[in-house]
Image: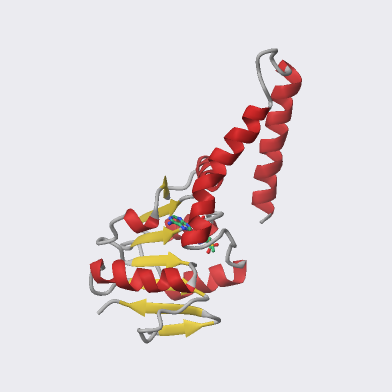
Amino acid sequence: MAESIIFILLGGISVTTLILLFGWSQWFDPRWIVLVFFVLIIPGLYAAFTTAPFVPSSRKRHVTMLKLADITSKDTVYEIGFGGGWLIFQAAKQAKKAIGYELSIPLVIFGKLKKLLIGSKANLYFGDMWKQNYDDADIIFCYIMPNAMKRFYKEIWPTLKPGTRLISNAFRIHDLQPTQEEDSVFVYTKK
Ligand SMILES: C[S@@+](CC[C@H](N)C(=O)[O-])C[C@H]1O[C@@H](n2cnc3c(N)ncnc32)[C@H](O)[C@@H]1O
């Protein structure tokens, strides 16, 4: 959270400095900012209504998710909807490969800036989690709404290789028995 505030402050300071240095051009209509802002937030709004809004997991839950994942250096890890990125950046320190997808453009920009700053090997993509391939996944992290969990079970679960583990914060797959459960984090293992 502290890092997020620092990034937002730095972004605000940079934009303000540019405006103070160059001022508004005669031809520049500030209404463009409003338009660009709405264009930037549209994919995130779509993601929020169809799958899950950006409500980050608590740090305590993130830690439980990492603990239950027990990542090794042979694992390929995905986070679907990486949000603020903390989990996928931590996972990247232990995994062979760490891949995150996110539909909210501001969060993708934030994640990519943070990746540069901290020098993480996580691969972060702007992309719809429903349109990706997870057949090499050993571990998938998620925190998505109950309806999206149902959809995941119907559409993505059958495509996973045996042994893949889904680590879900807060929400269950009701048709499956979790293989582990702690502090409302559920682990499902593909047979
Ligand atoms: C509840 S937040 C969880 C964020 C992070 N995984 C965590 O646990 O802190 C869900 C995230 O999924 C993203 N999201 C929702 N639908 C998505 C989709 N179809 N493709 C990619 N990301 C999506 C949202 O933008 C949001 O950042």
Dividing the picture into quadrants, the one containing residue 61 is: bottom right
Q: Residue at x 69, y 26 (%)?
A: 30
Residue 171 percent location from the top left of the image: 49, 76
Which image quarter holds the N terminus?
bottom right
Can you see residue 189? Answer: yes
Dividing the picture into quadrants, the one containing residue 147 is: bottom left
Residue sticking out furthest to the right: 20
Coloring scheme of the render?
Answer: secondary structure
Residue sticking out furthest to the top: 26
Residue 20 percent location from the top left of the image: 76, 21
Answer with left or right where residue 12 lies relative to residue 153: right
Q: Residue at x 43, y 68 (%)?
A: 148
Compared to residue 89, the image places residue 187 above or below, namely: below
Nearest the eye: 190 or 106:
106
Residue 170 percent location from the top left of the image: 52, 76
Residue 150 percent location from the top left of the image: 39, 74
Compared to residue 65, the image places residue 79 above or below, namely: above
**Total marks drawn?**
0
Residue sticking out furthest to the bottom: 177
Compared to residue 175, the image places residue 36 above or below, namely: above
Answer with left or right where residue 58 lies relative to residue 26: left
Nearest the eye: 99 or 73:
99
Which image quarter holds the C terminus?
bottom left
Can you see residue 96? Answer: no
Q: Residue at x 68, y 38 (%)?
A: 10
Q: Residue at x 40, y 83 (%)?
A: 174
